[in-house]
Image: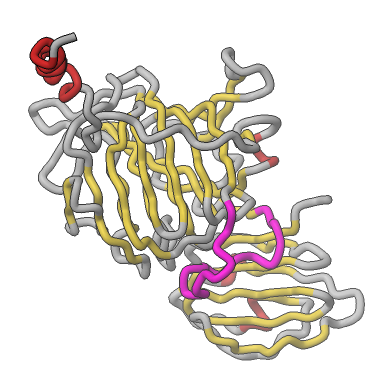
Amino acid sequence: MKPSILLAILLAALPTLTARAQVDGQFSPPKPPAGKWAQLFSGALEERWTGMSMSIRSPLITTTPNPDRPGEYILHIARGPTGIIRSMKAYENFILEYEFRHLTEAPSANGNKDTSGNSGVLICHTAFPAFGGPFPREGHEIQVCNLGNGSWYTSHGDIFTLPGSISKAISDPRFGISTSCGQRSMPVAFHGSKTGEWNRIRLTCFDGLIQNEVNGTLASTLLRATPRVGYMSLESEGAPVDFRNMRIQELPADPEMNPKHRVPLLPEPMTTDYITERKVTALPGGNFIASVDTNDTPVLSALFTGLGLPGTQATGRIVLNVRDGKASVTAKDKEVVAPQPLPAEAKGEMHLESGKFGHVLLFKPVAK
């Protein structure tokens, strides 16, 4: 073949080759390597999830069989007050896949927000909500909302550090950036599904990198994120939403990770009872943790009876930790009662009828 003919063929093919070139954000990243996936929506809801700032037994939380995957369920979160349920297991590096759909439309032109959908998946946080609020003080949220688009948020795949928290991250400059409500990375092109249709999400978290793919397209990224280890949770905030097909593949942990990236974790897998009735509540035997938020200054021996606690006053978040036959108490993250032996055959009670209390949580080890 003559060189001139060969050159003509290559030039003719050049536009086609250029059109197929990789462009950031227009093609999904490579598929993850084959690994072991754990299904998070199989069996009973209580096997992997528990309460945090709402009860796992709340009427807002229901499950129905997943017709596409026998043995799994669809999680439905109904309209109601803001609250979250959390995973009983903590995670570090992982790939998380799930699908969600909104059941109500975004606000109309007249600004009516009663029908808009707002939820989210929170990661890398403690088992405790912030004092006075439903969200933890740390962590990152993967937005699941149907609110339309504003100057500092979108409904198509935002991820952000929780506003007002101790979390830190840097938004990837390839995407939209806002600091109006946490360090926020926003997609620059919209690939979300219509109301009522399912969205496919793949979240990759590895050593401080958080990537959010929406329906096969990389939509947003946080860099140098901290914390990097903690629980994940699902949010109820104002409108019904469905989740399904949630699975996780854990990736190798960082053996040299700085401790500052790790949130305080529970001493073992524990369920959480979110207590709303302000009455005398029996405390369990064995190991447990009771967390009581208050702006009053109750006397510990009157708030928790039968445990031999002193008549010390405390305020703020009061945490009673009973472990291996000893009881200790912290208030505002400071120790006010050092570990002391429990009385013989101690039977404790928590007196919630005695004052005004905010969040009250009772942690118990998962039955083995």
Viewed as shown, does residue 40 lie left or right of 119? right
Q: Residue at 50% across / 42% down in the picture?
A: 95
Question: Magenta stretch: residue 267 in it?
Answer: yes
What residue occupies the far front of the structure in this picture? 2
Q: Is residue 253 visible?
A: yes
Question: Magenta stretch: residue 117 in it?
Answer: no
Give 103 or 222, whichever is nearer the viewer: 222
Kindly indicate the quadrant of the structure image that contains residue 242: top left
Viewed as shown, does residue 237 lie left or right of 357? left
Q: What stretch is highlighted in magenta?
A: 252-271
Give 15 or 33, whichever is nearer the viewer: 15
Q: Where is residue 313 in the image (x, y as percent from the top left)?
A: 56, 88
Viewed as shown, does residue 325 lie left or right of 113? right
Q: Where is residue 24 in the image (x, y as percent from the top left)?
A: 23, 37
Q: Residue at 49% across / 81% down in the picture?
A: 332
Q: Position of residue 301 (x, y in %)?
A: 68, 83
Kindly indicate the quadrant of the structure image that contains residue 288: bottom right
Q: Can residue 114 be seen in this view?
A: no
Colour scheme employed for the rendering of this structure: secondary structure
Q: Quadrant of the N terminus?
A: top left
